[in-house]
Image (cartoon, rainbow, N blue to C red):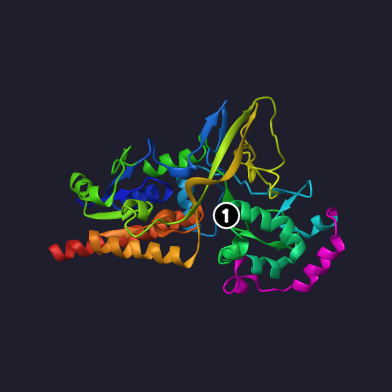
């Protein structure tokens, strides 16, 4: 019987294992932490369900991915709305035309927007850096209030050094005053008692999937794990520079850390699940309150204060030399492990800034490639 070794235990890895199991293929999933699930596991504090690593909103255009997630756990109909602190006022993010009059210099802002109405934002993102793209979209006043300080706090470098490739999905001016962050047709948050943990547990609930935790795998130790698991193929969902011993250098990531606090005597402490704090006078970048999405009925709430510049791998720094370095690691690992035996999936292995639905889509696509490779191997053997 075919067996696949999966290195890493986040959402992508769990989805690969689930997809393969559905086709009768067993897998062994190796996770360095004490539990599988990566950054999206939900926890409880003082009886309140919360996300220890910051807010995760399931939103997608991919019907197959949405249906898969809902087979694992029911989702509610939560739609994500974000607030932002601008000039000491709580306004909406993305920028709404209806919020302009609440700000100083509103006439100037409206004039700058009129000059830019009709800009093809997606096309501009292919040519401009992040700062140029934003200035072209909204003008200097809104850019300085909403965008530049937040972006530079988050990334720790000037905004003009960042790529604009991902900007159209994250930054906008809403001419129609739609207050919700995501336009996707399928949106929600897990409606079960354990949040995203129910999604992960559902994906792994198959006798063909073996999860081994507390296992730190490197290229040097991989052969032993392959033999022990009697695996035919390997799927890597881990950071490749770490896996390969940093032999070509270290990939750059922008990390965050979330400090969570239980507030026992209030139902809600802020008006939205996430409130952004772009000003440099705030040491944190945003505050999370999961209860808005979970809709849990209980006393108290949990606030998560998000700080940047932590030694964690959240956001890849999309610069050409980093992309080239990850490509080099992929080429090297294919050659070392075997080009027909090695597959990559997920944000860590592919060094991408992607959402949960994209992680699951990559996992499903990688599973198809794995199944094709297994069939080809059987045909050769047979």
Q: Viewed as shown, does residue 138 lie left or right of 254?
A: right
Q: Foreground: 49 or 270?
A: 270
Q: Is residue 6 left or right of residue 143?
A: left
Q: Position of residue 315 (x, y in %)?
A: 51, 54
- Res 304 → quadrant: top right
Compared with 223, 140 (above or below) is below
Principal secondary structure, stretch drawn in magenta: helix
**Is 84 situated left or right of 55 in this image?**
right
Compared with 140, 12 (above or below) is: above
- Magenta segment: does it hold 294? no
Q: Residue at x 58, y 51 (%)?
A: 187
Task: Name the residue tied to disc 1.
Answer: 155
Give residue 208's quadrant in the image. Answer: top left
Q: Position of residue 218 (x, y in %)?
A: 29, 49
What number of labels is visible? Answer: 1
Tell me if residue 290 can be seen: no
Q: Residue at x 64, y 65 (%)?
A: 131
Left or right: residue 117 compared with residue 104: left
> Residue 307: image x %, image y %?
59, 43
Q: Quadrant of the C terminus?
A: bottom left
Q: Where 180 falls versus 113 (above or below)?
A: above
Circle 1 SS class: helix
Residue 231 shows in the view: yes
Mark 1 surroundings within 10 Å by alpha-carbon count, few (fewer than 14), some (14 through 19), many (20 or more)? many
Q: Position of residue 338 (x, y in %)?
A: 23, 62
Query: In which image quadrant can residue 147 be found?
Result: bottom right
Give the camera-side residue of 58 and 71.
58
Residue 119 falls within the magenta-colored stretch: yes
The region drawn magenta spans 102-130
Judging depth in this view, the residue of 191 and 357 nearest the camera is 357
């Amino acid at each position: 019987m075919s067996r696949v070794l999966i290195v890493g235990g986040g959402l992508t890895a769990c989805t690969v294992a689930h997809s393969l199991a559905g086709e009768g293929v067993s897998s062994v999933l190796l996770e360095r932490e004490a539990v599988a699930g990566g950054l999206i596991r939900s926890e409880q504090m003082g009886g309140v369900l919360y996300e220890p690593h910051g807010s995760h909103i399931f939103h997608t255009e991919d019907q197959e991915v949405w249906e898969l997630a809902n087979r694992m756990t029911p989702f509610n109909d939560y739609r994500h709305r974000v607030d932002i602190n601008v000039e000491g006022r709580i306004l909406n993010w993305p920028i709404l035309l209806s919020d302009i009059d609440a700000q100083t210099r509103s006439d100037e802002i409206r004039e700058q927007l009129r000059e830019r109405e009709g800009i093809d934002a997606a096309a501009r993102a292919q040519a401009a850096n992040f700062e140029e793209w934003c200035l072209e979209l909204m003008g200097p006043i809104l850019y300085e209030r909403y965008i530049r300080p937040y972006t530079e706090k988050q990334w720790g470098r000037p905004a003009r050094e960042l790529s604009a490739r991902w900007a159209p999905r994250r930054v906008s001016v809403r001419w129609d005053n739609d207050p919700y962050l995501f336009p996707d047709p399928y949106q929600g948050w897990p409606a079960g008692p354990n949040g995203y943990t129910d999604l992960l547990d559902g994906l792994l609930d198959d006798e063909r999937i073996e999860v081994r935790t507390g296992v730190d795998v490197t290229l040097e130790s991989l052969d032993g794990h392959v033999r022990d698991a009697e695996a035919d193929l390997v799927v890597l969902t881990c950071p490749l520079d770490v896996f390969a011993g940093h032999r070509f250098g270290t990939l750059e990531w922008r990390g965050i850390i979330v400090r969570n606090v239980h507030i026992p005597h209030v139902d809600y402490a802020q008006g939205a699940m996430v409130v952004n704090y772009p000003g440099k006078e705030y040491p944190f970048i945003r505050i999370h309150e999961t209860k808005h999405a979970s809709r849990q009925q209980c006393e108290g709430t949990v606030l998560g204060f998000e700080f940047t510049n932590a030694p964690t791998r959240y956001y890849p720094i999309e610069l050409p030399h980093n992309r080239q370095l990850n490509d080099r690691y992929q080429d090297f690992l294919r050659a070392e492990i075997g080009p027909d035996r090695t597959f990559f999936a997920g944000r860590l292995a592919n060094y991408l800034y992607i959402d949960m639905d994209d992680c699951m889509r990559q996992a499903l696509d990688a599973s198809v490639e794995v199944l094709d490779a297994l069939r080809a191997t059987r045909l050769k053997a047979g």
